[in-house]
Image (cartoon, rainbow, N blue to C red):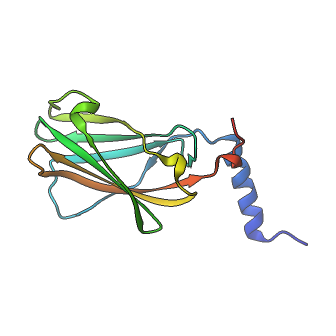
Amino acid sequence: MEPTFQMKLIFPFLLWLCFFPQFSFATRVQLCDETAEYDITVKGVEISPSPIVRGHPTNMTFNLLIGNPIIAGKMVVDISYFGWHIYSDSHDICVETSCPYLSGDFALPPLRTPLAFFLPGSYHMQITIVDGDNNKLTCFGFDYELVIASLFGDS
């Protein structure tokens, strides 16, 4: 049986993933409300490795630009799997690093979520950051892929 054109394209890509799984890629970010004027501007999200390998360490770094100093607040993480909400958690941002956060460039510490228990597939993560008075400072989302570790060989 002759391989189809799609199989000829997929096999080299899977082979590439087997040998180069530890790359970090900037991820396309969408604001929750494109018309809102958030006090925190999202400059980018970096995921390493990308794609995320189930059961292996993953870092998600959020590069932000802060307008006004932040004295207290929290980050709310919501994860959806093919549109179904499956996970929610919140983190006190002043426990992760020390407050206050001054105006200017800022990178939140890498986020770690319990991805080891999730099924492989396409996910959407939404991050909402609020101040100590529960005012929304930013809200953004991004998509990512989770793959099975056995595709890369268990280590």
Left or right position of 77 against 49: left
Q: Residue most toward the right?
A: 1
Tell me the quarter of the image containing the N terminus: bottom right
Q: Nearer the viewer, residue 114 or 64?
A: 114
Q: Residue most toward the top?
A: 98
Q: Who's the residue at 42% across and 69% down the image?
A: 83
Q: Residue most toward the front?
A: 117
Left or right position of 130 against 144: left
Left or right position of 59 against 21: left
Q: Position of residue 82 (x, y in %)?
A: 47, 67
Q: Position of residue 33 (x, y in %)?
A: 23, 63
Q: Position of residue 40 (x, y in %)?
A: 19, 46
Q: Who's the residue at 70% across and 47% down the image?
A: 150
Tell me the quarter of the image containing the C terminus: top right
Left or right position of 41 against 2: left
Q: Who's the residue at 67% across and 47% down the image?
A: 17
Q: Nearer the viewer, residue 143 or 117?
A: 117
Q: In this figure, what is the number of numbered marks?
A: 0
Q: Nearer the viewer, residue 77 or 86?
A: 86
Quadrant hosting residue 94: top left
